[in-house]
Amino acid sequence: MAIAWRHLDEPDFDLLRAWLEQPHVARWWNHETTVEAVQRDFGPAARREEPSEDFLALLDGRPFGLVQRCRIADYPEYYDELAPVVEVPAGAMSIDYLIGEPARTGCGLGPRMIASMVTRTWSDHPDASCVVVPVVAANRASWRALEKAGLRRVGEGPITPDNPVDDPLHYVYRVDRGGSSVP
């Protein structure tokens, strides 16, 4: 069964808040879950007021996960963190992701969701050169999902983690347009 996508909209924020409160999500995302915080952090993308894109991943018409996607050049502070660790070519995109429904974790949906969004990135952004994804080294499930989705580890180094309890060591994964993982 194929994964379908739709943009995250403000009526989805209650669902997103519930996901962000799930222990398996909260551990890595470390995001405030008040109504105001979710509105502040996800509202601009939902209203298409900023260049990042937030998508709900759907299976059988029901949301199970979230993917955030952006062009790295649109966020200079993000570029500045990544550039000392790996090459960030012109046209590089990045994603962040979560599976919100606990019953949907551990059954192979993560790699499928990532691969599906990478494929969609090539069609949505014809000028995208690659997808670069940093993940905190301690989050083995996340970096294994990237590997299973066809991304390859191309570097490692210190990047400020989402959760301050984590070490700054991140692994950085990449896939180029056309499927290669390195330039």
Image (cartoon, grey):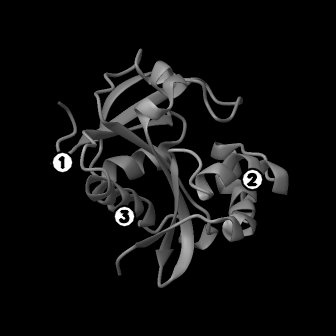
Going by the numbered disc 1, the residue's amino acid type is Gly
Q: Residue at x 62, y 69 (%)?
A: 101
Q: Nearer the viewer, mark 1 or mark 3?
A: 1
Residue that numbered label 2 is attached to: 38
Q: CA distance from mark 2 to mark 1?
A: 34 Å
Q: Are marks 3 and 2 in contact (CB under 8 Å)?
A: no
Q: Earlier in the sequence, mark 2 or mark 1?
A: 2
Residue that numbered label 3 is attached to: 112
The image quadrant that residue 130 belongs to is top left
Q: Residues within 10 Å of mark 2 (few under 14, many from 20)?
A: some
**Image quadrant where one finds the N terminus:** bottom left
Residue 157, x across and y down, in percent: 45, 20
**Residue 168 visible within the image:** yes
The answer to whether residue 117 is left or right of residue 60 is: left
Residue 135, x across and y down, in percent: 48, 37
Q: Nearer the viewer, residue 65 or 93?
A: 93
Residue lying at the far top in this picture: please name it: 84
Q: Nearer the viewer, residue 113 or 130?
A: 130
**Image quadrant where one finds the C terminus:** top left
Q: CA distance from mark 3 to mark 2?
A: 26 Å
Residue that numbered label 1 is attached to: 179
Residue lying at the far front in this picture: please name it: 49
Q: Earlier in the sequence, mark 1 or mark 3?
A: 3
The answer to whether residue 15 is left or right of residue 110 is: right
Going by the numbered disc 3, the residue's amino acid type is Arg
